[in-house]
Amino acid sequence: MAGGFRRGNRRRTPKLEARGELESVEREGPFKEWLGMPDLYRFHLVVDGVAYSYQTEDAELPVKVGDRVVFRYKETKAGKWVDRNSLGKAIDPSTYQ
């Protein structure tokens, strides 16, 4: 089915967004999910006391402990998973010049 077309009139649940200070990062991996797929690294992040999981092909994150971060995530039975390529530094407009 072509992208952008949905069946029915069901509303999609909006993505959840979180923002806060990155307190700790732990890395697992690399994992090989299946043949031909790049290695995946799993990161366990703690942002303002809440645990999140993040999975990516990159061995290093674009943020470090102590940074103010912003990202989109979804809640599953396995926990809170950060959307791929949504993790980044939060820019405070009052300090940005």
Image (spheres, rainbow, N blue to C red):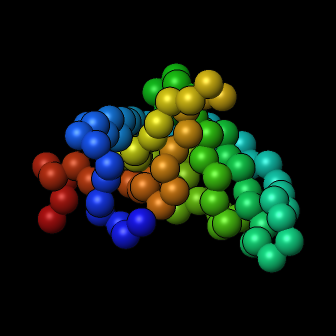
- Residue 31 in sight from this viewpoint: yes
Q: Quadrant of the N terminus?
A: bottom left
The one nearer the camera, 89 or 2, is 2
Q: Quadrant of the C terminus?
A: bottom left
Q: How many marks?
A: 0
Please name the residue shown 75% across and 72% down the image. 38
Residue 69 is left or right of residue 38, and the answer is: left
The one nearer the camera, 72 or 95, is 72
- Residue 17 in sight from this viewpoint: no
The residue positioned farthest toward the bottom in the image shown: 36
Q: Where on the picture, by quarter, is residue 16? A: top left
The one nearer the camera, 28 or 80, is 80
Please name the residue shown 35% across and 67% down the image. 3
Image height of 91 relative to 22, above or below: below
- Residue 17: x and y in percent read 34, 38
Residue 46 is left or right of residue 6, and the answer is: right
The one nearer the camera, 18 or 75, is 75
Residue 57 is left or right of residue 12, and the answer is: right
- Residue 70: x and y in percent read 37, 46
Please name the residue shown 66% across and 39% down the image. 44
Please name the residue shown 55% across and 39% down the image. 81
- Residue 28: x and y in percent read 79, 49
